[in-house]
Image (spheres, rainbow, N blue to C red):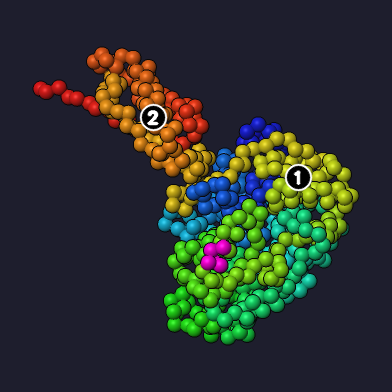
């Protein structure tokens, strides 16, 4: 398949290739590519929230290098739900790729009709047009037959996919759980899943995020009592912080507002889009008399206020930190408020959560959060539901997906315990290519799939180098070195050494190191520009700056055991002879 650029792997023309370009060993950033006969079908296009060790990064987005190299082969992008981790990168993909067709359920179409990444359409991120699909109807897309199947999740119109290929049927569950009492009354279409399983399934790609959780995931209705109790007992204002695309919980909160006589104020771009989309599509039904706005907040009595908030791109932890430290532009928390955190606390953010809770305590703001308070349940299937999905589909091959590394490996282990042979289970990493040829699966290579680091102010590709430099700046500080040289590289003035670092600025070791650093820089200039004392000798500017930076780093490390960022500024003084 010479026209498919993989960077080394040799794909057979009449075989099926399955490639995750995101979403493996991470929460979010889901993107899959199915390749057959030189044609590519994309599944989902999600974003992910960065961890605390990525300063200056607002979002993680899928790598598009492989797709850009083969974009004339892309048939369509099919979407399963409107969660950020499944469709948060659609506009980003459209900025880089020509995608002929985007298809998804009704709520996805309504939600994306309002979206532009970061809310900045003036920067070129288009609001996509999505073809609305009908459930249980098969759509022919090149060599693929795609059908959407109703599933349960925390969002309206969540679906799984049945994809017919010449190599057999694929079932892609997306994120799911089996909710027996869904808020919207729409049960998962287990009948259609069972029919698909009975017809024979070559490959199952299934949600792994709940693989460590025993039993069954509670229904979304399980939070109704805990939220009602927390809101009813609150004396002052109530702020409920939740994921920005949880339509079912929005319905519960709006119902509680009606019962408790409170007005609802929605804060956060993603949450506003979710609310509007849900209302338009009939997935949020409420009395408009309970609506209020940020502008009317000062006119309402504290006991009448129920704020529902989320952060940029729907990140609940983002807005929680803003409220705690007074950085939210829409409102400020005050003593007597109650904050209900109705969302997941991921392990990498436990320390951040503790600091935020301490801050709320100092402000005399009551906080309610966690499983004991019964104000949040997962949207992902637990172990018994994952076994049930395996039993219903009964696949020949299996890919655990949509989770961190430990979730995927535990799901792979669970599939083995359920009865699948080890050589039929593929816990893929991002970029790995699973080729299915005559019913036999094998990993044949990989393509580039490292995440794109996105900054709202700077634009998209924040480099790994700049992230590492920001880390160093936050822990080690910066040393700036200024030099003035003539056109031959002769040192005229300097070096001037300025330090921006609290660790060694006034230390005795630094006072001893400074003369040694000064001499090392002077020696480096003379070494790089040995002819600097002769007129018109010339010199290599880049080599001079690199040499000064290198010797400065070595000196600082040897004398101080410090690794500050070193910035070298060289000014060239050019003299023009009088005519």
Residue at the image position 50 percent from the left and 71 percent from the top: 333
Looking at marks 2 and 1 on the same chain, the residue that comes earlier in the sequence is marked by 1
Q: Eyeballing the image, is 486 above or below 34?
A: above
Given residues 483 and 10, the one toward you in this image is 483
Identify residue for label 1.
Answer: 427
Q: Quadrant of the C terminus?
A: top left
- In the rendered structure, find residue 20 and report the number of the disc placed on it: none
Given residues 382 and 440, the one toward you in this image is 382
Circle 2 packing at 10 Å, graded few (<14), some (14-19), many (20+), is some
Q: Could you tell me which secondary element the residue under label 2 belongs to?
A: helix
Q: Is residue 388 left or right of residue 17?
A: right
Q: Main secondary structure of the magenta part?
A: helix
Q: Eyeballing the image, is 155 above or below 349?
A: below
Residue 488 is situated, as x and y percent measured from the top left of the image, at 28, 19
Which of the 4 quarters of the picture holds residue 123?
bottom left
Which of the 4 quarters of the picture holds residue 433?
top right
Residue 449 is situated, as x and y percent measured from the top left of the image, at 62, 42
Circle 1 packing at 10 Å, graded few (<14), some (14-19), many (20+), is many
Residue at the image position 31 percent from the left and 14 percent from the top: 531
Which of the 4 quarters of the picture holds residue 519?
top left
Residue 443 is situated, as x and y percent measured from the top left of the image, at 75, 38
Q: Eyeballing the image, is 241 above or below 398?
A: below
Is 345 magenta? The answer is: no
Q: Is residue 101 visible?
A: no
Magenta residue span: 358-362
Residue at the image position 71 percent from the left and 63 percent from the top: 378
Q: Is residue 538 left or right of residue 369?
A: left
Residue 125 is situated, as x and y percent measured from the top left of the image, at 48, 55
Identify residue for label 2.
Answer: 514
Q: Quadrant of the N terminus?
A: top right
């Amino acid at each position: 398949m010479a026209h498919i650029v993989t960077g080394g792997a040799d794909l057979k023309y009449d075989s099926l290739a399955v490639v995750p370009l995101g979403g493996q060993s991470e929460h979010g950033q889901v993107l899959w590519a199915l390749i057959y006969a030189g044609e590519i079908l994309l599944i989902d296009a999600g974003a992910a929230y960065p961890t605390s060790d990525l300063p200056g990064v607002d979002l993680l987005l899928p790598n598009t290098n492989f797709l850009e190299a083969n974009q004339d082969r892309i048939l369509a992008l099919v979407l399963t739900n409107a969660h950020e981790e499944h469709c948060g990168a659609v506009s980003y993909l459209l900025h880089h790729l020509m995608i002929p067709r985007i298809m998804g359920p009704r709520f996805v179409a309504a939600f994306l009709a309002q979206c532009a990444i970061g809310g900045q359409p003036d920067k070129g991120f288009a609001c996509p047009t999505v073809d609305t699909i009908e459930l249980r109807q098969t759509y022919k897309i090149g060599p693929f037959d795609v059908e959407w199947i109703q599933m349960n999740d925390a969002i309206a119109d969540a679906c799984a996919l049945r994809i017919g290929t010449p190599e057999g049927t694929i079932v892609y569950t997306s994120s799911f759980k089996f909710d027996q009492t869904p808020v919207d009354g729409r049960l998962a279409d287990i009948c259609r899943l069972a029919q698909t399983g009975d017809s024979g399934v070559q490959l199952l790609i299934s949600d792994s995020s709940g693989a460590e959780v025993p039993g069954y995931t509670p229904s979304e209705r399980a939070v109704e009592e805990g939220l009602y109790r927390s809101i009813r007992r609150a004396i002052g204002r109530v702020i409920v912080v939740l994921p920005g695309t949880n339509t079912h919980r929005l319905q519960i909160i709006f119902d509680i507002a009606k019962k408790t006589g409170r007005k609802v104020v929605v804060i956060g771009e993603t949450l506003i889009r979710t609310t509007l989309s849900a209302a338009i599509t009939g997935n949020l039904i409420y009395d408009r008399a309970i609506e209020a706005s940020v502008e009317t907040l000062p006119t309402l009595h504290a006991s009448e206020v129920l704020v529902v908030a989320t952060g940029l791109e729907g990140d609940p932890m983002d807005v929680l930190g803003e409220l705690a430290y007074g950085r939210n532009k829409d409102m400020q928390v005050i003593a007597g408020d109650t904050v209900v955190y109705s969302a997941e606390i991921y392990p990498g953010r436990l320390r951040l959560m503790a600091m935020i809770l301490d801050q709320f305590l100092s402000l005399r703001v009551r906080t309610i959060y966690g499983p004991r308070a019964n104000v949040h349940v997962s949207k992902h299937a637990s172990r018994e539901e994952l076994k049930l999905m395996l039993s219903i589909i009964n696949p020949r091959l299996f890919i655990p997906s949509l989770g961190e590394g430990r979730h995927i490996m535990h799901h792979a282990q669970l599939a083995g315990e359920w009865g699948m042979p080890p050589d039929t289970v593929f816990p893929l990493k991002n970029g790995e290519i699973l080729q299915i040829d005559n019913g036999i699966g094998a990993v044949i290579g990989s393509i580039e799939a490292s995440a794109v680091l996105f900054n709202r102010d700077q634009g998209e590709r924040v480099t790994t180098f700049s992230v590492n430099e920001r880390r160093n700046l936050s822990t080690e500080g910066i040393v700036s070195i200024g030099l003035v040289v003539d056109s031959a590289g002769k040192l005229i003035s300097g070096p001037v050494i300025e330090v921006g670092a609290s660790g060694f600025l006034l230390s005795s070791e630094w006072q001893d190191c400074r003369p040694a650093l000064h001499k090392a820089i002077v020696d480096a200039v003379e070494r790089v520009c040995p002819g600097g004392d002769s007129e018109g000798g010339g010199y290599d500017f880049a080599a001079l700056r690199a040499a000064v930076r290198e010797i400065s780093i070595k000196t600082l490390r040897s004398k101080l055991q410090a690794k500050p960022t070193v910035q070298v500024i060289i000014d060239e003084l050019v003299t023009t002879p009088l005519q």
